[in-house]
Amino acid sequence: MRGLRYLMFVPALLLVSSIIISFNNYKDAKEDMRQDLNCALRQFILDEPRQLMLLDSLTSLHHGMVLTLNDVESCFSGQLTCPSLKDTSHLSVCLLHHDDQEPFKEEASVCSDTLLWHFSQQESSDAVIALKAYANPSLCAVLGHSDQRIPLAGLALCLLLVLGMGWKTRMTGSDTEMAVTSPLPSERQIHLTPMQEQLMDMFAAAPDHTLSKEAICAVLWPKKEQPENTLYTFICRLKTALKEQSDMEIVNKRGKEYQLVRKNESSDNQHLESL
């Protein structure tokens, strides 16, 4: 079970990675939409009939005044390649001098760069036409434009791992229930040290809940020379903890093995020797 707890970091890492990738892909999709607005705006200015339409619309425009052109007036959406931008886009136009600051104050989900157009028919060489395109695609539209296949696959894998670990924990819990619950009505949990808990997990996983002394020492004290005395003290303390908090006990079998049994079962095995 201890190893299973450490494995919980895997779905957590998958979840965090999927969220980060999804957010980056979302940002890339908005940048792609912004570039689409920039490209469409440049194509709009290069089209001569639209230039004439734009000049006609500016006859009554004062310096610094912002004029909004809807799609019926400008047919700007026809230049866009991203379908989610077509229904929510519009143009803003104004006259300004070269030393003027950014005239556009409108906020939108996606907006183009400001394009400055100096046309040959204007009376003053100091004034130019500034154009900017805006669009307000929905969150779902931007997500639909972004590539979310890898994040979705990561989330699906994360869910499968969590479900698998939950099933594994449930199955392991049914095997170790006798070792972790108290016979008292309150069913309070046994308080064990981490190393004692590790040994109880080993007993639960072992056939007949039986472990040899060598197997225990190899796991708990792999680098210690002659760990038998340490094992003797360790088992004594674990026996005391089990005796006080549960109906389980550890018995010595032929001086070579330890077995985890219930107290009523140990009374039926007279051939077992105490430690």
Image: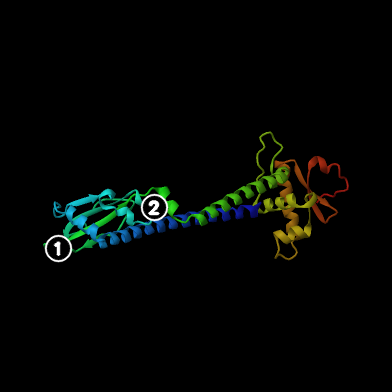
Instruction: Residue 87: tell me if it is visible.
Output: yes
Q: Element type at marker 1?
A: loop
Task: Give the residue drawn at x 71%, y 59%.
Answer: 219
Residue 274, horizontal then vertical, whole percent: 82, 49
Residue 247, horizontal then vertical, whole percent: 75, 40
Residue 53, horizontal then vertical, whole percent: 21, 55
Total numbered circles = 2
Instruction: Residue 103: tell me if it is visible.
Output: no
Which residue occupies the foreground of this view, 35 or 267?
A: 35
The residue tagged 1 is: 121
Task: Give the residue drawn at x 32%, y 61%.
Answer: 39
Q: Between tags 2 and 1, which lies in front?
A: 1
Question: Do the residues under discs 2 and 1 have CB atoms within 8 angstroms?
Answer: no
6 horizontally vs 251: left or right: left
Residue 47 appears in which quarter of the rendering?
bottom left
Question: Which of the numbered marks, if any, corresponds to residue 272?
Answer: none
Task: Give the residue drawn at x 31%, y 59%.
Answer: 40
Q: Crowding at label 1, few (<14), some or many (≥20) Cα neighbours within 10 Å?
A: few
Residue 26, horizontal then vertical, whole percent: 42, 55
Mark earlier in primary sequence (2, 1): 2
Which residue occupies the foreground of this view, 109 or 67?
A: 67
219, above or below 264, in the image: below
Q: Element type at marker 2?
A: helix
Q: Residue furthest left?
A: 123
Q: Residue furthest right?
A: 271
Mark 1: amino acid: Gln
Which residue occupies the foreground of this view, 93 or 122?
A: 122
Mark 2: amino acid: Pro
The residue tagged 2 is: 83
